Amino acid sequence: MRNEDALANGPIVTLTTDFGHSDHFVGTMKGVILNIAPEAQIIDICHSVQAFDILDGALTITQAYSYFPSGTTHVVVVDPGVGSARRPLLMSTGKHYFVAPDNGVLSLIMDREEGVRVRHITGQHYFLQPVSSTFHARDVFAPVAGYLAKGIDSQKFGDEISDYVRFSAPKPKAAGDKTLRGVVLKVDRFGNLVTNFTPHDVPSLFHSPPARFKIVIGNREITQLHNAYADALPNELFGILGSMGYLEIASTRASAAQLAGSGKGSEVHIVLEGAAVASSGN
């Protein structure tokens, strides 16, 4: 059923892509949407997702979607398989709609939401014709979003499926009695290293005061946690619980990635003194 909440004040469509801003791609998508639903408000969440990086796209949309009004349509295009047999999807959560390729980019939202319904978009009469094999964002995803914003019921776009692509984000694992091994999920534009450790994974690290610990990344050992970036000394590497809900390795007014010589995919170890750690991974 079509959620009318957002339509009362005008439909909202968000865009999350790896297209950047140096080409016409984003502007063209907006033109397609507005031709179909001139009343739509189009909001850019991010167009600087790392190119071809489906996990980065998944992290980006998962951090943002829930802050939008009920009934919002989110277009998520990180699509290295464009033109292949991969399917276009329409996912609904009861409050939000997501239009994306079937490559796992919506996986983290699926982990958070109950009652997710996924449809294979097969209603080609909603597409722009002819459909380019290299620009489905323009010819498939944008027009579907436009028709959703116009009020077309989600059931009209295709049948429900259950065999869609889904992955799990990497989880920390035990690497000895007192050590957890994790990974850097992303590096933000300030050079902060966003790890996959959460307070659930290492609760004793986030007690006040925290357990004695060291964080090992690259050839650096970190023994300080701060509550705010401004609490640290210049060029000090420290840990902080960031707004994404993950432990970050940061440095005040400097790039922690450069100071640590590390980046996305780098291993991170937390060594706790005292009780043995438990793995949250498999």
Image (cartoon, helix red, strand yellow):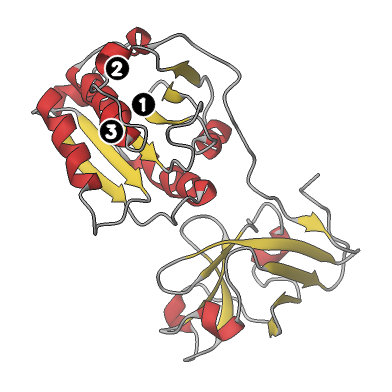
Mark 2 lies on a secondary structure that is: loop
For mark 1, what is the residue? 97
In the figure, is residue 18 to the left or right of 180? left
Q: Earlier in the sequence, mark 2 or mark 3?
A: 2
Q: Nearer the viewer, residue 86 or 282?
A: 86
Within 10 angstroms of label 3, few (less than 14), some, or many (20 or more) residues? some
Q: Amino acid at mark 1?
A: Tyr
Secondary structure of residue under mark 3? loop
Mark sitting on residue 112: none
For badge 2, the amino acid type reads Asn
Instruction: Name the residue nearer the viewer: 27 or 40.
Output: 27
> Whole-Å distance between the Cαs marked 1 and 3?
11 Å
Mark 2 vs 1, N-terminal side: 2
The answer to whether one can see residue 71 in this image is no
Q: Are marks 2 and 1 in contact (CB under 8 Å)?
A: yes
Q: x%, y% of residue 225?
A: 60, 76
Mark number for residue 3?
A: 2
Looking at this view, is 136 or 275 the one in front?
A: 136
Read off the residue under disc 3. 69
Please rate how many residues cluster around mark 1, counting C-alpha atoms within 10 Å: few if below 14, some from 14 to 19, many from 20.
Answer: many
Q: CA distance from mark 2 to mark 3?
A: 11 Å
Q: Secondary structure at mark 1?
A: strand
Query: Where 117 falls versus 256 (above or below)?
Result: above
Residue 103 position, x and y percent, is 53, 35
Number of marks: 3
Does residue 211 appear in this view?
yes
